[in-house]
Image (spheres, rainbow, N blue to C red):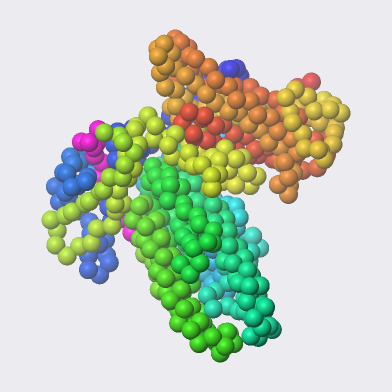
Amino acid sequence: MRTSPALALIVLTLSAAAQTPSIRTGTQIVIVDVSVTDSHGNAVHNLKSADFTLLEDGKPQNIVRFEEHSAPSVTTPPKLGPSLKLDPGIFTNYTAAPVDRPLNIVLLDTLNTPLKDQAYVRNQMLAFLKTLQPGTNIAIFGLTTRLILLQGFTSDPAVLRNALEHKKSSPRSSSLLNAPVGTETMSDQLADAMGNDPAAAQVIANLQQFEANLAAIQDQMRTVYTLDAMNQLGRYLSSFPGRKNLIWFSGSFPISILPNADDPSTVQFTADKEFQDTTNLLTRSQVAVYPVDGRGLFVPPMMDASNSGSRYARNQRAFSQDLIKFSTQTAAEHATMLEMADATGGKAFRNTNDLKSAVQNAIDAGSNFYTLVYTPTNKDWNSRYRKISVKTSIQGVQLIHRHGYYAYAPQNAMAATNSQTPPSGYDAMRSAMQRGGPVPTEILFTARVVASPDTSDKAAGTTTTAPSTKGPFRQYTVNYAALPSNVSMPTGDDGNHVLALQFVVIAYDRDGKALSSVNNPISVSLKPADYEGMISGGIKYAQQISVPVKGETFLRIGIHDLIGNKVGAIEIPASAVPSQNP
């Protein structure tokens, strides 16, 4: 591994900048954020460690660290973490964020939300911004079939309003969202056309089977995309200090898809393991999820005025069947909301049209809380679920906190998270390298990028080009400097430390089409002296990629810890890269 000497100093500065007074998840500690409210929903302040009793699987635990966090005064400017001063051509995925207050993330989920409800959600958010408290830091993301960063963290209401009013935030129909219960289907139309013809019975039954399977497959795809986005958010927010509040506007929460009770032959898909891995990642990054049902208060669709009711006229049992199906489906969706909130220490908001108040309540709850830290007395890291219970001697208050975790062995916790196998097929590095996506910060690093003044008709070195990519090409050199503390380097039987990393650069055009790429996985055994040198000087590597000269291009630069399954990425326009001297 090699890079310029200047980056060795930068990585040390980066290491210092990443150190904040906020608690970070250690290998043998558990962090529990607890919101305490009175009977009116107001935050309760000035409690002490002695006011709490913390239990794991019913056994008392010793609170080794205790902190109270209160919403800062509106007149108090945010205290930012250390900033980096980088020379031209040097880029980083580190961002100086406030260290004295939580960060808030709004996720506008168009993948799982009906079109009419998306418009209502956006209008409620615009109304909320009119009363936004000064100093409240918010980022806005959108979810289609991929996660989109609409606006980075800012406390400026005008900037947030512009992001909501931008065409990227406009409501859009989801092609994977199933039709509401009671909607007339193709099989219904066929039954109307064929009447009581006995010969049509099997055709109608086959069409109903197809429709049921298609609906299950669409639910499966939405589940995969949704969990993928949650994983990306967890990795993006990983290095930001302190608590993060994820306010997730959605109209459906497809996590576990079970066989149709009326037809067990339809597609079956469950995502319990993937859901578990996702909530583990979110809690490790101190992200509390606040799901908000963007549909608000709504009546069963079969009672809606837009429903003609023709299918119920010919089949009187269909109405009661659809009503039961709707009730079961809604209950399952709300149960998933509650499960996501309980697993991460957030709160679910259902059956309310006042969505702007739900946002404010989530921000208030996530700004006023107590942090309890303990080292589990149970050292048997068997990957099983452990229940967390927090009690208080104070009467008349409500406690909100996450209710448990999966006890992965400390050295395996990172590798276990997001090690999903099909059907989800989640790949941390694939998601990290998507054009325009949020840059993950599990591995903080800097990259010095320079462009050759010369061009060539052919791509050089180990660069792989897409079949349609044409020259001429310019070569770019990427010099990495990464934080060793972010990377897993276990000790082998020989006493040496094992390091396995993957360095990837992908060149995209402005529409997100991959033009060229380079992928260099490495694995080395570090002797004690080499390991100490890397710890003090940083992880360094150099890589070259050939990029088409014509057109607007963007470089997505990433590192993947193959042992710990951590990722880090940077995205820059090629036009921002200086040319090296001839």
Residue 159 in the image: state x and y as whole percent. Answer: 56, 58
The answer to whether 37 is drawn above or below residue 300 in the figure is above
Residue 143 in the image: state x and y as whole percent. Answer: 57, 57
Left or right, 505 with reference to 152 = right
**Stretch in magenta:** 364-379
Name which residue lies at 35% across and 52% down. 343
Name which residue lies at 46% across and 31% down. 564
Name which residue lies at 64% across and 60% down. 168
Residue 402 in the image: state x and y as whole percent. Answer: 31, 52
Left or right, 207 with reference to 360 = right
Name which residue lies at 54% across and 52% down. 224
Residue 523 seen = yes
Q: Report the label total.
A: 0
The foreground one among 42 and 59 is 59
Q: Residue furthest bottom?
A: 313
The foreground one among 117 and 160 is 117
The foreground one among 105 and 250 is 250
Residue 67 seen = no
* Residue 341 colored in magenta in the image: no
Q: Quadrant of residue 494?
A: top left
The answer to whether 119 is drawn above or below residue 335 in the figure is below
